[in-house]
Amino acid sequence: MPDPIDVYLLWGQSNTTGYGGADDVPPALTAPHPAVRIFHAPLDGPLDGPGSERSLRPAARTWAPLAPGFGREPGGFGAELSLGPALAAASAAPVALIKCEEPGTGLFDRWRPDDHGDPDTLANRALDDAAQAIEQLLEEGHDPRIAGLVWYQGESDAVDANHEPERFGPLLRTLVERIQEELNDGRGFRKVYVRVNPADPDAKHLGFIRQQIEAAADADPKAAWLDVDDLELIDAWHVGGPGLLKVGERAAAALIGLQKPANVAATAEGEPSGEPASRETPAHQKVRPPVEAQAAVAEAPDAATAPATKAPRVIALMNQKGGVGKTTTTVNVGAALASLGHSVLAVDLDPQAHLTLSLGIEPAELDKSLYDLFTDPQTTAMEVVRQVPPDSRNLAVLPAETNLAGIESELSEMVATGLAQTLLRNKTADLCKQFDYVLLDCPPSLGLLTINALTMASEIIVPMQAHFLALQGMTKLFETIGMVRGGINPALTVSGVVLCMHEANTILANDVISEVEGFFEAARGTEQPWAHAQVYHPPVRRNIKLAEAPSFGQSVIAYAPDSNGAKDYRAVARSIAEA
């Protein structure tokens, strides 16, 4: 019988190989490890001439981390120095690490796992190099099986050159699927996604990429993600030797924590041969800094150590009267909250798709939209969500297109059973957890789309003008909200009113404000949904920049940050955040 060996792929960017130098190596790790093999396939070719070790594809090595030319520094090393021994200590079988990386690359530009035909993509080269290493292990009498992947995510996917960050989640899933099918006979394996410190805290896709990494791990019971923001950078891009040792230790702890309990035997599904010896480990583990106590995680992972995630505020911006500034308010409050450091998801539920257009996304060019999320059971929210390029790394959108108008008839059978009314809430639940605020831009009618919003929302904000007819419409709207609260969403509340297109020098406007404030004041201490509502201040003044910004596909916060419209919406956003 061939001897089993657990194979771990250590893939990603330049920090995977590492900037650790000889002086950083602890004495305990300088000697070869009898149960660890390394195959190094540097995807960018030799750095030290045609005969260098880096030019060999793959270069099979025993544990000798200080071989010249192996790392980015003379005698350098990466996370493998601590990862290998930690994994071997927890396994009944020896361990092989296959390292493939290229500096300054990302899933978008060079790895491109969705491109099967181009032999020069890094995904295709890495898969080929790994296959060669596995073939060598077979020739040596081993039975190699992929036990895990450590994907080291550097900074290139967070910089402005990557204009489609919303594709990160699907590309990461594609990479995992290809490893499973092409290297592991369809068997599953464990995954750990590592995210390093931001080289540029203002990189506009940074927060969005991090959210997609977390969402990919959260959706997969065999995956975990590591925040290593506490590790010190040695320059704008790289973690030094001590930090890389911590990365290896933490990745090993997370991989060990993803294994099955000791009393569950290996199965045909391809579980790794090495299992924890004596206790159950959590099925899914998230690891955040600080992790000085991570030595304890390696010994006894505990899912309870992960911090609780604060639920997002899900706010429906709603008014049954059209033309009152509802979409303008959704766009600009969202952008203002994002500029204050909050992560924001805007959801365009209006078939006119004005919110989508206002944020620089052309509906006709979308591969998938909210229409697909509602009508296609296989479409996920992560496939639909889009980053907002001109505005902020903290702002994303679930876009709409005009065919959204037809979903009520297309979902008629589900409407009859009551399932259609909760589709949005159910299909966006995992995505929403990645944001601080979710803003729902409702159409000006009480149809299926608005019902989905009211089912999902925890609170309502009403954009309106300080006009007599708008005041009458607000009364009718609140009656509708009361009925919704009495049925599908008992927790629904009204947070307040945002006054739009305000003309402060008119008597009528001031009278309407007094009426609204008096209406809210009269409800204090009652069970009405608006018992704690307020008129958000300041009212948003009429401003030509608010009308111009959508034609440039930007919020007014990005288009004219010093305009009165931008100043007013920033102040309103602060009021909402402080409420």
Image (cartoon, rainbow, N blue to C red):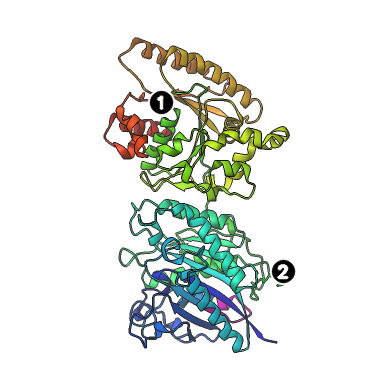
Q: Quadrant of the N terminus?
A: bottom right
- Look at the picture and state if 354 lies above or below 145: above
Instruction: Please name the residue shown 72% across and 71% down the image.
Output: 268
Q: Work out whether residue 454 or residue 450 is closer to the camera in this orientation and state it.
A: 450
Amino acid type at circle 2 is: Val
- Left or right: residue 486 versus residue 318 is right
Quarter of the rendering containing residue 34: bottom right
Quarter of the rendering containing residue 506: top left
The segment highlighted magenta reads: 87-97
Is residue 96 within the magenta segment?
A: yes
The picture places residue 373, in percent across and down from the top left corner, at: 58, 44
Asked whether residue 300 is in view, the answer is: no
Mark 2, residue position: 264
The picture places residue 487, in percent across and down from the top left corner, at: 66, 27
Lower position in the chain sequence, tag 2 or tag 1: 2
Marks 2/1: CA distance? 57 Å
- Left or right: residue 167 versus residue 70 is right
Mark 1, residue position: 536
Instruction: Please name the residue shown 30% across and 66% down the image.
Output: 235
Q: Secondary structure at mark 1?
A: loop
Asked whether residue 175 is in view, the answer is: yes
The picture places residue 212, in percent across and down from the top left corner, at: 49, 54
